[in-house]
Image (cartoon, helix red, strand yellow):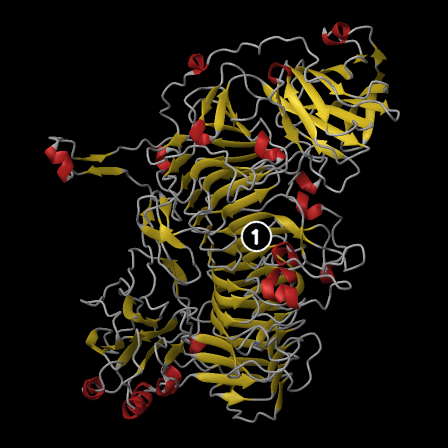
Amino acid sequence: QRTAATRRSVPRPPLPPHRRPAPHLAPWHPGSDTRRHAVVGRGAALRLESSAAFHSLVIRDGGKVVFADRPHGPPITLRARYILIRDGGELHVGSERCPYASRATISLYGRAADGAAVDGFGQKFLGVGSGGVLELHGRRPRSWSLLDKTLHPGGLRHGPYSSERRWGSRGLNLRVLDAGTGRVAAAGRFDTHLRAAECHRLRDFLALQPEGSVVAAAVGDSAARSLTLETRLLLRDRLRSRHISRLGYRQPWALVGILGGDPFLTAEDKREYHGNGTTGLAVAQREFLTYDGTRFTVTAFSGWIKGSPLYLHIGEVIDGIDMRAEVGLLTRNILIQGEMEDSCYGENQCQFFSFDTFGGHIKILANFSSVHMSGVELKNMGQQILGSYPVHFHMAADVDERGGYQRPTYLDNLAIHHCFSRCVAIHGTHGLLVKDTIGYDTLGHCFFLEDGTEQRNTFQHNLGLLTRSGTILPSDRNEAMCLAIRNHVYGNYIPVPSTDCMAVSTFWIANPNNNLIENAAAGAQDVGIWYIFHRVPTGQSEGQYPEGQAEHTPLGVFYNNRVHSNFKAGLFIGKGVKTTRASAEDPREYLTVDNARFRPHQDADPEKPRVPAVIDGLIAFKNNDHGAWARGGDIIFHNSGFSDNGIGLTLASDGTFPTDDGSSLEVSRSIFVGESSNLGSQGGQNSYWGKGANGEYRTLPRNKTFPIRGFQIYDGPVRMARCTFKKFTPTADRYSSAIGFFMKNSWQISPQNNVSQILMEKSVGLKVFFGRAGQWFGNNDNDGDKMSVFHDLDGSVTGYSNTFVGRADNYLLRHPGCVTVPRWNGVMCTGKYAQLYIQARRPENLTLSIARAAYHSHPVQLQGVNRGAPYQQYQPVVMLEQAYIIQWDGRAPEDIILYPINFNRGDWLHVALCYPRNTIFHVVKDIYQRRTGMVHSIKHYLAAPSRDSVLNGTGEQLFYFDRALGYLFVHLQAHEARQGHSYCSQQGCERIKIMAQMYPGGSWSCAPNPFSQRPAAPQRPMSQHKAVPCRACGAPQVRLAITSTPSVKYVRIQIQSLSKADIQNHLISAFIKVCALLHLKW
């Protein structure tokens, strides 16, 4: 609970012409008549000079209403059930060149059941139709910024004025300022919770303060128990408070106003206390002018969380990651608000909300003449009704130069807070600029693109905080809403909340061709920024682009965005929405969360080259599950920082063979931190609190046992280069590793996954971890778990260059020169590795057993991935130029296809497959082109007279079936060149198709090893691969810190002092070291 005053010198200019009474504007004093349907039409140009109230106000046919700007006069409030501007009508409050200097309020009133809706707009709205002009321009203060210093619980905001003692202690805390100079004149704390006598002292304090002084008041802990009725009434009258007379136990309350002044000049806020804590701060804030025209801001805020003072707010860069807290200004001198009831009523989803959610809304339709909003506050706006949002551009098409607007449309410096359905909804609209806008404590997706067609919109330096669930779309809903709202499912289908819903996001980006620059998203119930894909346009935009276009559209600019304190993920790239109505075939609701992958190509044409999506400068910290998750290809992260997340970053491939034609994902020049020195605060949305690696108590990202991973490998291929890892240290409760793997993974893992120039700082206690059976990992025996692998190109992780790292029990990779690392549950091996893709039909439910001939007593069991396709697939990682044995837990499938993937020209395997002795074979080799589904270069295999004639690699198309042993022998070799990340060559995927005709009664068991006994092939010993010291490893030195101000360079200073033990041991290693930086070009 605290106040602060900050100054910025802005000399007051002489009254400009735009603010002088204009001769063509007639003075207008319409008074208050809530039954009047006012129309301002042709020839009417009115200057509203006093507050007014109507049933409705329609401005049309060239009519104009301009708010009078009289900074020293009373504020103007316009009340109406709705205001509609159309057909040449204009509403002006200030202008772009001369922002409004007074205080203006547009207040929209009415209950949901009152009156009829206006076609196309609904109820309780400010609407702009065809030909309408809406120009709202208030003062534009700094919308939001980052703390410069850390604010400890109970401490004051930093600024030119700060209290000499903290006053986060119990009672009423007051600051009195001289309104003419902005200086603090008096301050006091009054413990009206414990001592009734404090009420007398408080009354005496107020009696000494002159009328017209600025006062800031806030509750610390509790102030109500001994606060007498007499004192409450005095405070009500002197402070012009609406809530103090009903102040309750530990109820947060804050006020900024004028002693004895106009109630309209009082800013006041309160929150309810429920015993288990509040949902946020009570914040009151106002701007004032000194005698010399200098503006200053006074803020008071109050809050209680589970009996503890508020939170720790970081104001510094910690462990190389910029974790400074965002500070936003929620008040503006132009206010648009909905007038609300005290509680929820009627058909307003009251089973989910205790408060009234039928707020006002602004709706802008196509062909408007001009819309610009800046310096505007929106409060109590939005409705839990489709299409009624605080600011909604509805099917407005191009709103920039491309649409014929000489002054492109923008929203600038808006403060949208305590609203009931989104913040800014962009629907069928392109080219809109949303800048310096705050969305705070809102329901449903906040900054929202609706149908998947919206492109070229720019979100620049916006702040979204505390995005909560709403009811409108499945993706808005939380678990309870998802299960309860079933009006649009088919039949008796019960939604699955974790997959159908639970996706509410601060930025919901439904088309990648939009720009996100310097935004911050924090505290969302699910995701901070989510790129979601509509396979076809939805809603009123149906048919506007061909199927799949959004998934192939290149990414717009993504630069220097921050995501933190979100539950599911900071940034999520992937998934889509269901674009068909509920039916018997798919009973899920329309627009339910569905599967999709991001695969950008030039001109959104999959036949043209890929266009990498670049995520430049992401900062992701303290997200419960993921800092960032991205599925697709090509996607590149660089200059990014990840800290204190459950999992820092997961990169998942475009698909899995054969649906993916090969793509890449990459992270470079980035920093990963496991448990930083930012310990956080207990309480609030974070319910996970426990011991850190150094024994200190801190926030934890899932619970105290969740295995923390910096970079998580899922499938691949992925590449990581020039990254730094810090503070990944396992504890008695949990594993914590710099590099880890997706848990319970059934999918393929590519041996093309690779790392290079990695810096593992000394604080990393576990570089790599492959998991172990137990909590979180399950049995750790899915196909992907067993095949986990990556390639350490330069030895910067393992200490051995050109080394593959796999799971310790995977004998498909092993040879005698491998080195086991028990702490990793891993093994390091040199050699050449690729993948063998096996497709099986009739039956599709068998377990495959595959073994290297040299280690035939250590087979690997693979279950396959049943994707609902008419075949099963298995994808083991194999060592090249080796012999492999394949068996099944039943009679072999009738159709088997073997693909050599990630094979370079000339790479080969010998494969022996077990069949019943009486089997007849038809074996064909061809090349399959996945994009067209066509095959070419078909060649039929002949039966060979001996096994050796097949395995000697003559190039002939031969197979040999040993009826005595029951094994079919084939030589699998790549003959075409493969490029880049492609699984196969440009010609297509080479493969061998084996069609077997089997008869009943034949035995299908085979001997363990049909190959001649020979030791495993010798490889170069690991000692010959010893890596040399890497001076260029890790994030580049000019990027010692990943910050939201990348133009600022940092110098590393190391300070080491001596402990008592060091002194006793006669150590003299205390020092201060300043590291000089080289400015390198990249």
Q: Left or right? Give the position of 457 relative to 914.
A: left
**What quarter of the picture does the C terminus occupy?**
top left
- Please identify the quarter of the rendering in which residue 1000 is found: top right
Q: From this viewpoint, is residue 1035 visible?
A: yes
Q: Is residue 369 above or below residue 1048?
A: below
User: For this rendering, which residue is in front, 1060 or 96?
Assistant: 1060
Q: Which residue is mark 1?
A: 530
User: For this rendering, which residue is in front, 740 or 246?
Assistant: 740
Q: Left or right? Give the position of 859 relative to 625.
A: right
Q: From this viewpoint, is residue 989 visible?
A: no
Q: Is residue 45 above or below residue 991?
A: below
Q: Is residue 988 above or below residue 413?
A: above
Q: Left or right? Give the position of 880 relative to 321.
A: right
- Please identify the quarter of the rendering in which residue 292 is found: bottom left
Image coords of residue 917 (percent x, y) = 83, 18
User: For this rendering, which residue is in front, 700 or 774?
Assistant: 774
Inspect the image, locate mark 1, and give the three-letter code of the amino acid beneath it: Trp
**What quarter of the picture does the N terminus occupy?**
bottom left
Secondary structure found at label 1: strand
User: For this rendering, which residue is in front, 574 or 735?
Assistant: 735
Image coords of residue 963 (percent x, y) = 81, 13
Q: Residue at x 27, y 80 (%)?
A: 193
Image coords of residue 415 (percent x, y) = 46, 68
- Please identify the quarter of the rendering in which residue 1007 is found: top right
Within-10-Å neighbours for mark 1: few <14, some 14–19, many 20+: many
Q: Residue at x 38, y 73 (%)?
A: 282
- How many marks the image carries: the answer is 1
Image coords of residue 520 (percent x, y) = 46, 55
